Every structure is written in C-alpha cells, then in structure tokens.
Amino acid sequence: MLSRGGATVALVDKAPFPRDKACGDLIGPRGVQLLADLGLALPGSVRVGDMMVVGPSGRRVRLPCAPGLTYPGYGLAMRRAALDAALRDAAVAAGAVPMTARAGEPLEGGDGIDGFVLGGGRRVRAGTVIGADGAASSVAAAAGLVDRPRALWGFAVRTYLDEPVDLPVIAFWEPRPWAALPGYGWLFPGPDGCANAGIGVGALADRTRGKVAAQLLPAFMAHLRRAGLVDRGTPGPVLGGWLKMGMVGTRPTGGRVLLVGDAAGLVNPLQGEGISQAMRSGWAAASAVLVSSGRPERAARRYRAWLRSEHLPYQGITAAVQAALLPRPGAISALGRAVTFPGLSRVIAPGWAVFWNELLDGAGRTPGVATAAAVTRVGAALTARSASRAWLGEALKS
C-alpha cells in the first residue's frame, strides 16, 4: 500500500522468508475483502464458511458465515509461512526495499523514535516507523507504548495433522469437569488435506502462565479424538507464540511510531482472530501516512480515529468480558454449556456469528444483525465504566 502510493519503504524483517508462525491460519471475511480490494490473490488457499462450536458437554452449534454489504460470506485458510511470504513478495514487487536484520538501538529524532540501528550497524531512519513485529514488539517497547501490567496476554500453541477437516471448529474444553480452559481450542481446515489444531490460553498480565498451553495440548488432542472430530490425528511439530488481545495496555501511536496487528493488541479477545485485523490495520496505517503530507502527528491522529471507529465499540466490550471471565473457569464452563444448549443455540447462532466475529459493521441485513446489535448495545452499557473501556478511550482519543 505505501509503495503503491509512492512512498519509499524499508521492509525490515528479522529472518528470511518463508518462516513459520504459531497461528490458526484462518483469514476472516474482512481480510478476504481487503485482499480482493488490493488485487492480491492467494493461490493454494482453501475457502471456508460456517464454523462449528463444540461446548463442554459435547453439544454442537453451527454458526453461519453469511455475506455482508462490505465483506463476503467466507474466509480463507492458508499456512502462515505461505501467507506471510506471499504478502512480503507483493510488497517487494510494489517497490518496498527488503532488509533482513534485527532492529537494535532506537534512533531518536526531534519528536521521538525515527529509526533503528539494524544488525550489522546499518542506521535506517524514516518519516514514520510502522511496528508490525508481533505481540512482543520491540518497536512498541522502544517507543514506550506498552503498559505490561494492563495488557491482556495469551499464549497459543498449534500443530498440523495429516487428515482433512470440513468445518472450522472452536471448542470450549474442560481439562477438568466444570473448570474450562481459560481460552479456546481450535481445529481448522488447511490446504493439502491437512488440519491445524491448537489451543490458546489467556494469561491476562501474568505471562508465566504461557507454558500451560503447551502442557495441555496433548490432552486437548485426545479430547478431539474422543469427540470424533479427528481420527488418527497424528500431530506434527508444535509451535507456540504470544498473543496480545483487545488493544488494552498498548497505545497504538507515539511520535512517529504507528503500531499495527499483534503489536497493537489487535486480536479478538473472544475467539483469537488476528490476521484480518493485522492486514486491515496495516492498510489503515499506510493510508493515514499517505494522506498526511509527511506530518507524523496528522497520520497518528487519522490512524487513531480509524481504530476508534473500527474497533473500540467491539474491543471495549470484549476486552472487559475477557478480563472478567478468565479468572473464573467455572463461569466459562457455565457459559459454554448455556450457549450450546440445543434450543438456545439454534436461536442465537446467527447473531452469535455476527457479534463473535466482529462483523456487525457493514453486515447489512445479514441474519442475526438485530441480535448482534442488541448484544452490542447491552454490552456497551454494562462495560461503560470498566477499566478496559476507560483505558482504550484514553489511548484512542483525538
């Protein structure tokens, strides 16, 4: 986007591509629409639609994936190693200058960080620094944009299985009866007849809890087999990584620095989606830079305004819900059983799909819109005085 718009772009990555990343590998409908808008095709990706949610008791509910006015009625599955390499290749083809080096000492300009000393001693300065370097962002840390005790951390581990899966599955799993996993489990379709399986564990501010996900993965795989969701399910290598959710605890701008994707905490607190948010926030940051006539403070204001409009209504609710539920595994179990109860689940499924996947804006007359809108209004009222809402309002103000 920046290179296409005429900007000179240094694309700095710590290691060569392709490289792997712990991820569920699903691109949601909004991300699919952005790819179409940019004219980027993803050969080898697999189209996915409805999602299955499995409750703690084994009951299942199918959430429909319906098209909206501003997004299609499907997502895509593609291994992150291939997706990231494809996006990087597109950026380089558009004119971005690739550099493989770690960012070291930050370089200070008159209004904060304006570059970094790279590995090998090369100094790179820029009118705007866009941090797209993940949950443990060194750009965010160098710019002093992270309030670690407030951040909503999570840790996810995933493996690939050598068998096909028809529908993406999210599981409310109980390692012990009525003590739900403080997070989510998944089983997603993938290309080449493989599946992606994993679990994500919410840690709130306690990052020492990240090891729990790796410890529980074998038991979760056994649960998937008992539930009949996989057959042989021979797992491959396991890879893990940190998540930062709900934008809480990270200011997205500071001086010349703009943070996007996981670096800004743009991961859905309820179901862990982050690829669409990362791509769209990258587009929004690039757009803000291109129309701001070389004035970083103007780009920062425009980018914060986009985040405030696009994500604050949803993230303000769901970040508060996550912070309240994670310390209460019994409450998560009760909620998981309630929303997958046969009579109730059929009624709420369309609205659940719209709200849970952050698809209300631009949904048009999609089934379930009225329910999702009502949940949003009630949720906003109930969380209006929450610490999460207050923090986000301050971080995203004009």
Image (cartoon, rainbow, N blue to C red):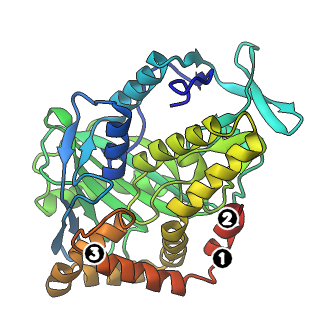
Give the image location of residue 258, x and y in percent.
66, 43
Left or right relative to 242: residue 149: right
The quadrant where residue 378 appears: bottom left
Instruction: Decide: is 115 above or below 100.
Output: below
The C terminus: image quadrant? bottom right
Q: How crowded is mark 3: few (under 14 residues within 10 Å), some or many (20 or more)?
A: many
The residue to which callout 3 is attached is 351
**Residue closer to the observer: 217 or 392:** 392
Left or right relative to 136: residue 160: left
- Who comes first in sequence, dot 1 or dot 2? 2
Does dot 3 land on a helix, a strand or a loop? helix
The amino acid beneath tag 3 is Gly
Q: Which residue is drawn at 17% across and 72% down?
A: 61
Q: How far apart are marks 2 and 3 (CA)?
A: 30 Å
Q: Nearer the viewer, mark 1 or mark 2?
A: 1
Instruction: Decide: is 143 above or below 49.
Output: above
**Residue closer to the observer: 271 or 329:** 271
Q: Distance between the residues labelled 1 and 3?
A: 27 Å
Q: Which residue is drawn at 70% across and 18% down?
A: 119
Q: Do the residues labelled 1 and 2 touch (CB within 8 Å)?
A: yes
The amino acid beneath tag 1 is Ala
Q: Residue at x 33, y 84 (%)?
A: 334
Rendered image: mark on residue 68: none
Does dot 1 land on a helix, a strand or a loop? helix
The residue to which callout 2 is attached is 150
The amino acid beneath tag 2 is Arg
Rendered image: mark on residue 387: 1
The quadrant where residue 33 appears: top left
Give the image location of residue 95, x and y in percent.
52, 17
Q: How many labels does the image show?
A: 3
Left or right relative to 67: residue 280: right
Give the image location of residue 152, x and y in percent.
57, 62
